[in-house]
Image (spheres, grey):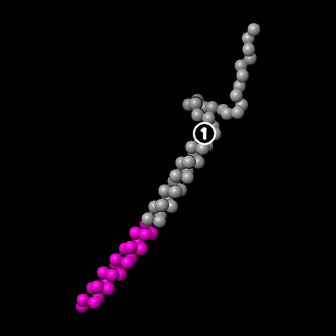
Amino acid sequence: MEEAPTSNNAMSTSNNGMSTSNKINLSGLGVGAIVLTTVYTAVLASQLMATKHKVDYLYYKELTQNK
């Protein structure tokens, strides 16, 4: 007696063996990583520019006092 093939409807897998939910989770992780990297880069750039403005001001102040 032959058994009917069973199908697992809980998770569908693609050809490479990854389930659809794992692909979605991985995509979400990738998007989250890009967003966090962008925010971190923006914070570092703003701190760098603030430091540059302070250094420029101090340098200009020193030049004008020495004249």
Q: What element carries label 1?
A: helix
Which residue is situated farthest in the top direction here? 1
Above-or-below relation of 13 to 67: above
Q: Give the range drawn in magenta.
A: 45-67
**Residue that appears at 63% across and 37% down:** 20
In the displayed structure, does residue 12 sit left or right of residue 50? right
Q: In which quarter of the image is the N terminus?
A: top right
**Residue that appears at 66% across and 32% down:** 12
Query: Does the magenta segment cover residue 29?
Result: no
What's under tag 1, amino acid-wise?
Answer: Asn
Instruction: Tell me where residue 60 sits by quadrant.
Output: bottom left
**Residue that appears at 38% across and 73% down:** 51
> How crowded is the residue under tag 1: few (<14 C-alpha within 10 Å), some, or many (20+)?
few
Give x and y (percent) for residue 50: 42, 74
**Residue that appears at 71% across and 19% down:** 5
Main SS, magenta residues: helix
Residue hosting label 1: 22
In the displayed structure, does residue 1 sit left or right of residue 25? right
Q: Quadrant of the C terminus?
A: bottom left
Above-or-below relation of 23 to 39: above
